[in-house]
């Protein structure tokens, strides 16, 4: 099974940069998109669906902001939008799908760079999601969380850790929440397979950062410890353009 995640930084913009052609040829079983910044009806009819896939949308109430969408060739057993918390859910950040042997979360985690109130909002979001995942784990369920976590976990996950100690996305309190997930039944699939490899999934549009590979690894697959033995590979597709992020694919046996 192949699951691909991508923060497209505006689906309508990505469509103008070849997204539909790329998505039609990747052969993933599930495609998870974040920061779509669109309602389904704002996407042209001929580009709204991918042949052979069901689509699921959770757009933000605020137009042109946030939002996630998922495409699946495997019909989910159930689908849920949001976390059940109105302040989070109006921003269209979560789609949860249940398959035969795991839950799959497609998530666009909050960005804390607009101020301390948004950092607090982000930390509360991490807390609520982990509480839900702890409950599922206690019931014997397996979980995969994917999407844009908006946090680089350790120094290997960004080019300039020293100069970003006080930047949201690398604040100690944000990084600690990733650690808490790893202490509560999850594995960072990419880092488990490639403990010393340096690859990034996001580059600012400024300063020719992508050309110079001055980036951050913000896009993850956290998988339940019991699923890790089934993970065959995690591929960061850094050569795919069209957004300030690149896609990441999980291959699961």
Image (cartoon, grey):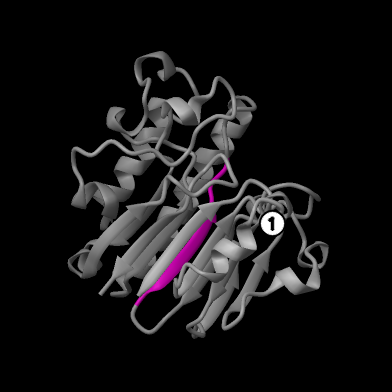
Relative to residue 252, is residue 42 drawn left or right? right
Tell me which segment is drawn in magenta.
102-110
- The image quadrant of residue 40 is bottom right
Residue found at x 62% / y 30%: 117
Task: State which quarter of the image contains the N terminus.
Answer: bottom left
Q: Is residue 236 above or below residue 138?
A: above
Say which residue appears at 59% left-offset and 47% top-offset.
Answer: 242
Q: Position of residue 224 (x, y in %)?
A: 28, 63
Task: In the rendered view, tell whether residue 37 sits above or below residue 162.
Answer: below
Q: Relative to the observer, which residue lies in front, 37 or 140?
A: 37
For the C terminus, the quadrant is bottom left
Task: Please name the residue shown 30% across and 57% down the image.
Answer: 234
Placement of 43 over or under 46, stated as above or below = above
Relative to 51, 145 lies left or right:
left
> Between residues 13 and 35, which one lies in front from this camera angle?
13
User: Which quarter of the figure has residue 61?
Assistant: bottom right
Predominant SS along the magenta part: strand
**Res. 116 visible in picture:** yes
> Residue 173 magenta-drawn?
no
- Whole-percent x and y of residue 26? 47, 67
Which residue is denoted by mark 1 in the rendering? 15
Q: Is residue 105 magenta?
A: yes
């Amino acid at each position: 099974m192949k699951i691909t995640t991508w923060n497209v930084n505006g689906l309508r913009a990505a469509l103008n940069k070849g997204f539909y052609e790329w998505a039609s040829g990747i052969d993933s079983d599930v495609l998870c998109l974040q920061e779509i910044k669109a309602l389904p009806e704002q996407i042209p009819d001929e580009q709204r669906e991918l042949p052979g896939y069901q689509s699921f949308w959770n757009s933000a109430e605020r137009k042109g902001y946030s939002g996630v969408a998922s495409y699946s060739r495997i019909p989910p057993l159930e689908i849920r939008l949001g976390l059940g918390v109105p302040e989070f859910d109006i921003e269209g950040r979560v789609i949860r799908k249940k398959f035969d042997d795991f839950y799959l979360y497609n998530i666009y985690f909050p960005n804390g760079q607009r101020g301390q109130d948004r950092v607090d909002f982000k930390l509360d979001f991490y807390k609520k999601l982990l509480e839900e995942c702890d409950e599922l784990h206690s019931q014997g369920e397996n979980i995969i969380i994917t999407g844009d976590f908006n946090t680089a976990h350790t120094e290997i996950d960004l080019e300039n850790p020293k100069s970003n100690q006080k930047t949201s996305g690398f604040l100690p309190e944000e990084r600690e929440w990733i650690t808490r997930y790893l202490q509560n039944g999850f594995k960072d699939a990419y880092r488990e397979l490639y403990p010393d490899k340096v690859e990034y999934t996001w580059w600012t549009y400024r300063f020719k950062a992508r050309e110079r590979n001055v980036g951050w690894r913000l896009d993850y697959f956290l998988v339940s410890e019991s699923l890790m033995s089934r993970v065959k590979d995690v591929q960061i597709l850094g050569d795919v353009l069209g957004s300030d992020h690149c896609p990441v694919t999980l291959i699961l046996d």
